Image (cartoon, helix red, strand yellow):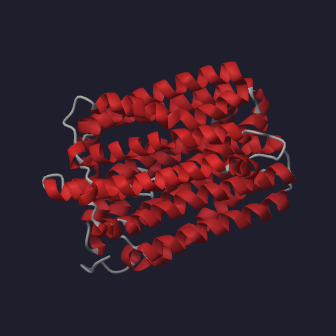
Amino acid sequence: MKKLIDYINSKVLVRITSLQTASVLTRIIAGILTSKAIAVFIGPVGLALIGNLQNFVSSFQTVAILGFYNGAVKYVSEFKDDVIALSKVISTIFYAAFVSTILVSFFCYFNAELINDLIFPIYNDYTYVIQIFAIVLPFYALNMFSFSIMNGFSKYKILIVINIIGQILSVSIALLLIYQKKLDGALVSVVIAEALIFLITLVGIINRRSLAPLIRVDRINYRFFKDMGSYSLMALFTAVFMPLVTIAIRSYIRDNVGYKDAGFWEAMIRISKYCLMLVSSLIALYILPRFSEINDAKEFKKEVFSFYKTVVPILAVGLFIVYLLRSIIVPIVFSSEFEPVKDLFLWQLLGDFIKILSIVIAYQFLAKKMFWHYILTEAFLIITLYTTSIYFIDLFDGVKGAVVAHFVSYVMYYGIILLIFGSSLFGVDTEKNV
């Protein structure tokens, strides 16, 4: 526990967390403002459509960069003082992601009508939105490439500042587009958001020492490509399949319960995301790097229970307060039309609480590159989430079934995680590796 508290005091709060907190708060405020505008000018039906597009965009953005971000950060950080090795790393990442992004862009552009029919109801034609996404996708890839290098060089301050300014610019344009073009404007804002952030990134790095001369075709190294493969596949698996399952569940709600109900579920998902954003940021900042350093079960157990003792009680109190204030939160974030969302809070927030408990431990899969453990448990979660959602939506004859499924799925997932790490967490303390 002391190590976590010392970390929070010395590194997070003092060095970067004041800015990181500002970044997270900016994202939350931007999300709330956008949600409010959608609620007022478009309504629940539009929110459901926007949710589908966001899931599609998220999935294909990760495919475009081959899920390289975490692996890129790791290897840039490792070889930042070795010019030749660094050149091989960034050359390999740049050209692999370049080819992948171009292929994905072409696929989306020339299959925009098919994609439109898959993520939107047949009577909605937003083919042009998919084509805009295809055109701006390379800017997202460049943005993430720049971010991975800055992150690898520990340029936390400029990264956070870029994120803050980018969020302000994105939400400003989104609000303007929603006000002027309603649903069409909201959909366009979803697909151009990352391109706008790249403009800020470009300004942020233009006066710094350029790494462009290090990006050379003859420096492509297939060993680095192979080494990053596990990071890539783990990132791709969740980032591709989870959004697609979310689209499938939302479509099932739309077809079997109602279009508005699909919008209500999307509204609950958004509130859930805002609630967990700060603690998720802390987990990414502390848990993953710390688990990467740990090599024995005793230290692993100590860190997990330290997090449980320090952060989890605060999370529990926060979620309980959110539940008590749900009658105030819903009309503030959305509008009176979203009144039914209040009935979804209990099961969603309970599921979110269990989700955090499980994710803290499951980060060990990423830290130690436990590839098959990660893939199989994520596959179990995704399949369980879909099947239980269909079952409970039919059982409750309404969208409440989706949030009950969220809770049940994460309870089952947490159970699997505890079974895998049971000996490390509950066995006799030893110095064995984890």
In the figure, 136 relative to 164: above or below?
below
Q: Residue 221: horizontal and vertical position, in percent?
A: 27, 65
Image side of residue 47 versus residue 124, left or right: left
Image: 399 above or below 409: above
Coordinates of residue 255 in the picture (x, y in percent): 85, 52
Please identify the quarter of the rendering in which residue 175 is found.
top right
Q: Quadrant of the C terminus?
A: bottom left
Q: Residue at x 48, y 47 (%)?
A: 315
Give the position of the N terminus as an image quadrant: bottom left
Tell me what residue is drawn at x 40 percent, y 76 percent.
Answer: 426
Rendered residue at 73%/56% (across/down): 249
Viewer-proximal residue among 362 and 34: 34
Quarter of the image for residue 37 reads top right
410 up-or-down from 205: above or below:
below
Answer left or right for 15 relative to 250: left
The answer to whether 351 appears left or right of 389 in the picture is: left
In this rendering, does residue 34 appear at all?
A: yes
Is 11 displayed left or right of 361 in the figure?
A: left
Q: Is residue 51 above or below residue 336?
A: below
Residue plotted at (67% across, 51% down): 111
Residue 40 shows in the view: no
